[in-house]
Amino acid sequence: MELTSLIVRGLVIFTVFAVTLLIATYSTLAERKIAGFLQDRLGPDRAGPFGILQPLADAVKLFFKEEFIPSHANKWLFIVGPSLAMLTALMSSAVIPFGNEFSIDGQLIPVQGITVNIGLLYIFGVVSLGVYGLMIGGWASNNKFSLLGAIRAASQNISYELAMGMSIIAVLMLAGSLDLRQIVIDQQDNVWNVVRQPLGCVIFITCAFAECNRTPFDLPECEQELVGGYHTEYGSMKLGLYLFSEYINMFVSSAVIATLYFGGYDVPYLSTLGLDKNIETIIGIVALFGKIFFFIFFFMWVRWTLPRFRYDQLMNLGWKSLIPLAILNLILTGGGILAWEHFTK
Amino acid sequence: MQEYIQVLGVELGKFSGLLPELLLLIVSLLWLLPGFSKGQKTNPIWLYSLLIPIAGLVYLRWFSAWKGQSLGYGAIHFPETSKYFYLFTAGFAAIPIIGFASRSWGKNGFTFQQGFFYLSAIAGALLSLLSAQLLVLYLAIEILSFSSYFLAASALNKNASEGGIKYLLQGSAASACMLYGISWLYGITGTLNFTHPLFIEGLKMASPFTVYMALILVLGGITFKLSAFPLHVWVSNVYEVAPMPVVAFLSVVPKVAMLGVLWQLLPAIYQAIPQVYQLIGWVAMASIIVGNVTALVQKLPIRTMAYSTVSQAGYLLLPLLSGSELAYSTLLAYIIVYSLANFGVLIILENYGWKSFTFSQFAGMAKTHLWPMLALLVFFLSLIGLPPTLGFLGKAGLFLVLAEGFQALKSTFYLWMGILALLNAAVALFYYLHIPYQAWLKPKGFETNSKVPEMPISAKTWWPAQILVAIFIVILVVGFFWNSWL
Amino acid sequence: MADKLFYFLAFVTVLSALMVVFSKNPVHSVLYLILTFFSISGQYVILNAQFLAVVNIIVYAGAIMVLFLFVIMFLNMRTAAEDARKRNALIQLAGVISSGLLLTIVISALVRVDMAAHIAPAKALNTQVGMVENLGIELFTNFLVPFELASVLFIAAMVGAVLLAKREEGERNAF
């Protein structure tokens, strides 16, 4: 029995991992297609019908490019940088509850990589570790532009981490547990958190943009200012890892936004239909992926809509606007919970 | 809603024991708020308003409530012996405020942030006196330390920032040491509360070597604030670069607070391991000797004063070797002597702009500045311990305590300490009397004329400071003759 | 199983701590220190203090070490050059004293191993003691005074740090 459950758990983890990579891969294509759509042109459509094989072509191209390490660069740290970025990006998808539980032969198999009761803190911890990939890569390149880009990326990252953490605390106060599955169940029993926490949702989405280094917060890697930011000196698959980790981060951020604020795998009124439990789980998974795709589209939509923030505007926004707003959100949430419990005794 | 307010009231009511200190902390936090709108400059009226929370605190504690609930796991306690330490800490903290209006503060004068630091330093010192739990003690000492680091750097020029950062680095090392020692004590005894019987039981059952190590580590942190050997290295640098009121504060208030803490902490440890007095004795002796020797070779009077506080800290540690009534009253008397004399010297050095003078610049000053030189002479005499001043009684009391310990325990350790203390008092004569020697016995030199500012630094602080100095002199001299209250 | 895990993690902790001290490149030192924090978090997990483990990673490895790296990158420290080998007697004395202290600490740790278990009243082991709820309850009832004092300490440290580091007008511009 132990071996079987181990194999089953391993299978779930492997599936989550594979799905993460697959979606990130096709996000690269989606990015260019959506960019084309927003700019009234066709995206790439040469490689395969509608450009389906474009990511494969990109990957092959990157693999075949020349691998070089700049002179006087710190060789090991140069390699460790993109590896760290990829590692932390992939680690964060482990705790997201992708669906309710499958019951096969009377055994409940939760559709989640690892089921810990500190899932929310785990995500926060992995996000705060994500800074290292950028910083080490930028420093190890022995290039002043890279260093500037790395410093900017790191300071942006840690500034927006604070407001993100505080808005997460408000969700924690509502759900009463750090376990992501518990948060989804709480949203199933009550209403989705976006209704109860509008301010917190806006803050979290803004901070997610900043953590993924997406426009309008993509100053660390913009071309007009910094040549390429922290990945100036990188080529071939190491650059591929950096860019790919950004898309994985985007996927995971969308998944976390959907789970924390938009109900996760919850579909309203699904339980009233009285379907078989496994079918319900599958519908939940499909719903979650629909929400995730919507948010990925949202990320890309904003990219081509808003202009980029200047560095001091970015810092001002993070420290002087978002953090006070997040604290205000906390106070309002606390007061709201007290008032709610009093008035609905 | 009613029951929420009720529960809230009960929970807050548990804090009523600490209410005065908490109010002081809240007032100190309120001092940060005007900085948002007014920028940083303060009006001198604000400075005298600092006296109000301190006076209120002393009134609340001293005259009404020396009791309170001990919050969770016995975090605070209100022993009778800490009362005088509390009074002295708060009282002596009020005196440097007179100097705050002087120009020696940074570019903006005394700022709101510095008011916050000052009040929170006082709050930290007072909380450390009330704490019965090692964790609360540690945090209170840290609040005191952090505020003093930033007060020391408040002149904001390059030297001051550098001195402040050096102070901070050494202080962080000392507090890391202390925290490690506290974790050892917790591991040995299983409780953080040093007034609990389990603490003493645990110390008795552990091996003495382990307890010694833990104690050395904890004492490392406490001797840092006390500026005793071996962590006294910061004094000369900080005394040179910090503004004088901060120097006055640092030379007295942390010392009194730490002595109060040791007076509570050591008896618990003596019960478990009676030989610990030797450790304290070694630290005291080393402080006295090192302080004296280093003070002899200094060229700047302010650095000499710094090293003299190191040796005075050693003398202050001597009554802690025995916990008797005589030791208690001797300690308090010596604290009074030391604090008043120290304040007096520093106020005079500040008021006449002599802070950064060298010794030779004082040559022949007795003719032109008789009153300050007389005052300095009285203060130096009381620090040495010579007869017409109260200092003589303080030093005599110390020797009596040592003699009492020798009689009780029949150990030659006390004898050696007495001899060394006497010899060092003689050595201290040389550097304490250096300024009066220069002033009276040397002819007026060429350098003095060009550098002595004829007007005091700031008229606002002139008269209050002179009045204080006069009061101190009266206390020190008259106290010698009328000492029945000791 | 927990024993083997403990020994492995302890080995990693001590090894990476030693590498922090012995590595020539400061960035390598920082990375080894991060590894040390990770292994200490692992030991917290063995002790069933999950919250503490994750918070350790968030605060130490995720925030404080990032700021360490900032400073090192800004100052652009090279590998410690052993150029003029000044045999400073004082530094050697300090080295002897600190290693002597370390030796005494290690010896005193080995001398007597049975500690508070004998004297503290034996309570049933509460396996849930590390969980977030219980930690919160303890923190906000029994340890409320240290908790609030720590908040004042943080404010003092923040205000002081800004005071010391703030650029006055006319100072050299540094990004």
Image (cartoon, coloured by chain):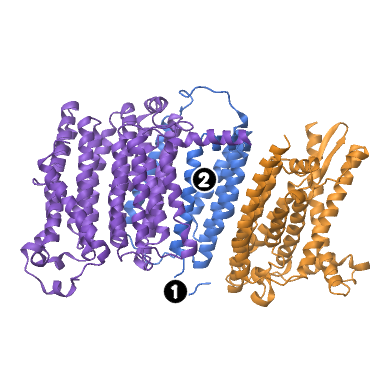
Chain colours: A orange, B purple, C blue
Disc 1 vs disc 2: which is toward the camera? 1
User: Residue A3, percent across and down?
Assistant: 79, 34
Based on the displayed image, in which of its 4 quarters is residue B265 positioned? top left
What chain is tagged by disc 1? C
Horizontal arrangement in the rendering, residue B31 relative to residue A158 (left or right): left
User: Residue A133, percent across and down?
Assistant: 64, 60
Q: How many C-alpha atoms fall within 10 Å of the one at disc 2: few (<14), some, or many (≥20)?
A: few
Image quadrant in which the C terminus of chain B is located: top left
Amino acid type at image mark 2? Val
N-term mark: 1 or 2: 2
Using the image, tell me which numbered label, if any, was put on residue C171.
1
User: Residue B33, percent across and down?
Assistant: 48, 57
Q: Quick one: B337 or C110, which is closer to the camera?
A: B337
User: Residue B24, percent across and down?
Assistant: 41, 46
Horizontal arrangement in the rendering, residue B288 relative to residue B230 (left or right): left
Q: Residue furthest front?
A: B2
Does dot 1 land on a helix, a strand or a loop? Answer: loop
Horizontal arrangement in the rendering, residue B443 relative to residue A147 (left or right): left
Q: Quick one: B160 or B475, which is closer to the camera?
A: B475
Q: How many C-alpha atoms fall within 10 Å of the one at disc 1: few (<14), some, or many (≥20)?
A: few
Q: Is residue A75 above or below residue B268?
A: below
* Residue on which the image places disc 2: C14
Image quadrant in which the N terminus of chain B is located: top right
